[in-house]
Image (spheres, rainbow, N blue to C red):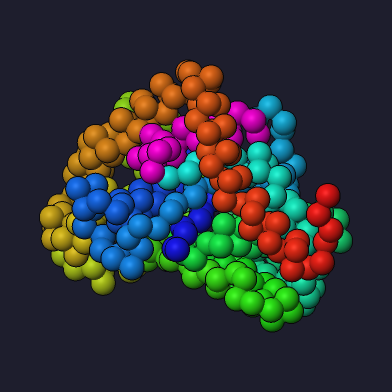
Amino acid sequence: MNRIFSGIQPTNQLHLGNYLGALRNWVRLQESTASQPALQKSNVSQPALRGAENFFCVVDLHALTVPQDPESLRRSTREVTAAFIAAGIDPERSVIFAQSTVPAHAELAWLLGTLTPMGWLNRMTQFKEKSGKHREDSGLGLYSYPVLMAADILLYKGTHVPVGEDQKQHVELARDIAGAFNRRFGSEYFPLPEPLIQSEAARIMSLRDGSKKMSKSDESDYSRINLTDDADAIALKFRKAKSDSDLLPDNVEALGARPEADNLITIYAALSDQTKAQAVAHFAGQQFSKLKTELADLAVEKLSPIGTRMRELMSDQAELDRLLKRGTERAAAVANPILRGAQDLMGLVRS
Ligand code: AMP
Ligand code: TRP
């Protein structure tokens, strides 16, 4: 049985980069795994994944690895859940839940931590980046974060993990940990999970600086399009986006030296389901302002229904919590027996 697992941390607001780099791919995977061809709306062909089960998790325990305001964390957890659904993840066909509500995640993380050499964790680039010069002061949780992520995936015997390039090393670590468990306790208990990296639109850049990733943590709100931005805000942010004074080029190579034009063309191509070459051909020789105007219209058309749906979902907290609870039950029903099996293999007693 193939199982797809992925997660997003509930920190701040989700933005266009999260949508194009993660959520939209999840929706496409959900469509391509549908067992009835009638449900196959996408042109992404992943026949091997037909019939796979999908788990999409709001990873609140991961968010706690850096300081969070408790009320904002709770709010973000609901908001990210709303974003999943508004973007097209169907809570019936996929399992949507919050990580902390299935305690087996933390329990398996402990078990896997006993099998993970510190040398493996010392190689993780994200820890090095996030801890920076304050290595001695950073929390144990930030260091062992990849072990919790391995537990997330292995708890469902996950086989495929759609993530951005930045998370590939963590998925590879999850493979190594699964291998270590299997060698030590026999049996092919855990399948070795594979990262699924979508390369197109894998990196959407800041609207203020084409050399920086669009990020939840950028101080300037003008650097990103939030999924909850209304039509006016979306249009305004594209209008104010950094540009250069040249006419737009007629070939993709020429974008190499123009990061802002490159980024806006990439976004245009992704939102209109075209290749970058097609988008370049469409704007060849035009003023930069033309790209901004068309992009603003297109983004409003594609994103404002998502924002509207998110606001609707957020206004009915009881319904959102009901959906999350149902997700928790479905996730736990898969996770608990797999945790139990690992506990048995490792020699823990049953009560
Ligand atoms: P984060 O916002 O870092 O918690 O990431 C959540 C998901 O969104 C991950 O799968 C990232 O790879 C993806 N993501 C975040 N920022 C961007 C971006 N600027 N462009 C493309 N994908 C992104
Ligand atoms: N670490 C991932 C990120 O920051 C989020 C995450 C946690 C995740 N657990 C996961 C992604 C399991 C995929 C599978 O983006």
Residue 116 shown left or right of residue 290 in the figure: right
Determine if the magenta segment contains residue 80.
Answer: yes
Task: Residue at 25% x, 51% y: name it.
Answer: 36
User: Residue pushed farthest right?
Assistant: 136
State which quadrant residue 93 falls in: top left
Q: At which x and y percent is residue 82? A: 46, 32
State which quadrant residue 136 falls in: bottom right
* Residue 224 in sight from this viewpoint: no
Residue 139 shown left or right of residue 233 in the figure: right
Residue 32 shown left or right of residue 272 in the figure: right
Residue 208 shown left or right of residue 216 in the figure: left
Q: At which x and y percent is residue 194? A: 49, 70
Between 168 and 126, the residue placed more toward the observer is 168
Q: Which residues are magenta?
A: 73-93
Between 188 and 121, the residue placed more toward the observer is 188
The majority secondary structure of the magenta stretch comes to helix
Task: Residue at 36% x, 51% y: name it.
Answer: 30
Q: At which x and y percent is residue 294? A: 20, 41
Determine if the magenta segment contains residue 146.
Answer: no
Task: Residue at 47% x, 59% y: name it.
Answer: 3
User: Residue pushed farthest front?
Assistant: 351
State which quadrant residue 233 falls in: top left
The number of numbered badges drawn on the structure is: 0
Task: Residue at 24% x, 47% y: name it.
Answer: 39
Q: Is residue 292 above or below residue 347?
A: above
